[in-house]
Image (spheres, coloured by chain):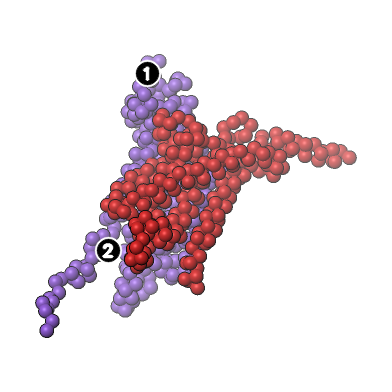
Amino acid sequence: MSDLGCGPAPQDLGAFHDAVDFLLSQRESISGGVCIGGLGEVGDLAASHMTLSLVAVAVAVAVAVPIGVWLGHVGRGEFLAVSVSNVGRAVPSLALLAFFVAFLGIGFTNVAAVLTLLAIPPILTNTYVGIRQADREAVEAARGMGFTGAQVARRIELPLAMPTIFGGIRTSAVAVVATATISPLANTESLGNPILEPQTYGDAGQLGAAIAVALLTLATDGVLGLVQRAVTPAGIRAGAHPRTKRLSLPIPRRAETT
Amino acid sequence: MSLELLVGQIQIRERTGQGCVAENGFCPDWIADNLDKYWSPLLEHVWLSVVSVAIGFLIAFALAVVAHRRRWLTGPILGVTGALYTVPSVAAFLLLLPITGRGNGTAIVALVAYTLLILFRNITTGLRNVPAEAVDAARGMGLTDRQVLRRVELPLAAPEVLAGLRIAFTTTVGLATLAFFAGGGGLGELIYSEKAGTGGIRFQSNVVVAGGLAILLAAVGDLIVLGVQRHVARWQRVAQA
């Protein structure tokens, strides 16, 4: 079997060691005939996993953020924003994907559409809430300075809502990267392939891919956490309380009342 | 005559389900005849969700009470439960396999891990939002810390605690559809079924019924907890009126 260019699977090293070995070095598949694993294949799978997730989250942001900003700005649709999020939580992603596959067919577009549907509720709700919670005094001040409604939304409410909006995007992105794992059920490549095809990849592949997905999700969460911190306007960062600071100036007291 | 015979044959064919499964359609007749096969996965799903949320609640509750007394613990507990929450469900089911083996137990461990963040966050927020006046008044009446917790803080925090329970239950029902990865059974096994004759994931009848049952279960659980919440927080409605 050396003509395949990859060695045989290593002998049993313990489940987790095997899994890590699968991620790092190529070996022959347990059913024979193909090379699996190694940084090359895992990297390719991770790349398509992330492409799929990125498309889904990007579409969800493009749809949900403008709607959320508009609803929040006019102060209507609280019921919509909140119930979309509640319903979204109740629908199992597997059932949703299965529904799409059963009635619309397989392929990248359908998986991306399912993931987009999954990503929209947290983004929509957080955008709405963030805009509603924008400091009313700042909004009134902007109005007083002659800002139009659109200017208030874009230049005051949106920056103030940014951390909350990115909180929603972060929640969604984590859910999407995690759920993209089931995409092979709809014939779309992702790190879910080794997980759902144990007959080719074996236990090591299944566990290895699970580790890779977990790391990818934690990395996504971490990176978006940094972005969230970066987009937080300096004035509303935790620890920045200019008013409190001003008030905490020492107030001279009379030592004694006469 | 011949038409009647034909119609009769079609019905017989559909009754046996061969045509429906082969054509992979959505057929009410076939579903009606096979309703009993949804019953045990549904019960399994209910069991998985209820047990996981119950265990998760006990753990989160204990953690929240401890963190309420020792504030500095809140950050670390949120960090750990948050990290658990971030690990994807499919990966969590698989990562546990070498440790706990296939079966219900593994599924429950993973599902419990997911409820912790939601429940802990809501219970601590609820306890923190109890008006300081109420706690002070109770202390002034000579109640001990434990009595304050049981008679004042917990009743007043109940609405938020139950709100967390609602979120945790709906989320768990959804995640339990993936429990088949850990051999935990549940409705997911019907949605994702490789067994011969069921047509895999694309068998529309299974997808609609099993998926629908999962959503229905989440909705029913949500309504039950909402009912409890209304009942427990009667004082809140009085205050609002």
Judged from the image, the secondary structure of the residue bearing numbered disc 1 is loop
Does A44 sit left or right of B38 as displayed? left
- The residue indicated by pointer 1 is A11
Identified at 49% across, 49% down, the residue is B169
Mark pair 1, 2: CA separation: 56 Å
Quarter placement of the C terminus of chain A: bottom left
Identified at 54% across, 36% down, the residue is B185
Say which of B161 and A136 sits in front.
B161
What's the colour of chain A in the image?
purple
Residue B197 at what x, y percent from top left? 64, 31
What's the colour of chain B in the image?
red
Residue A118 in view here? no
Does A64 sit left or right of A227 as displayed? right
Say which of A55 and A139 sits in front.
A139
Residue A215 at what x, y percent from top left? 34, 39
Q: Amino acid at mark 1?
A: Gln
Residue A109 at what x, y percent from top left? 49, 45
Residue B221's tag is none
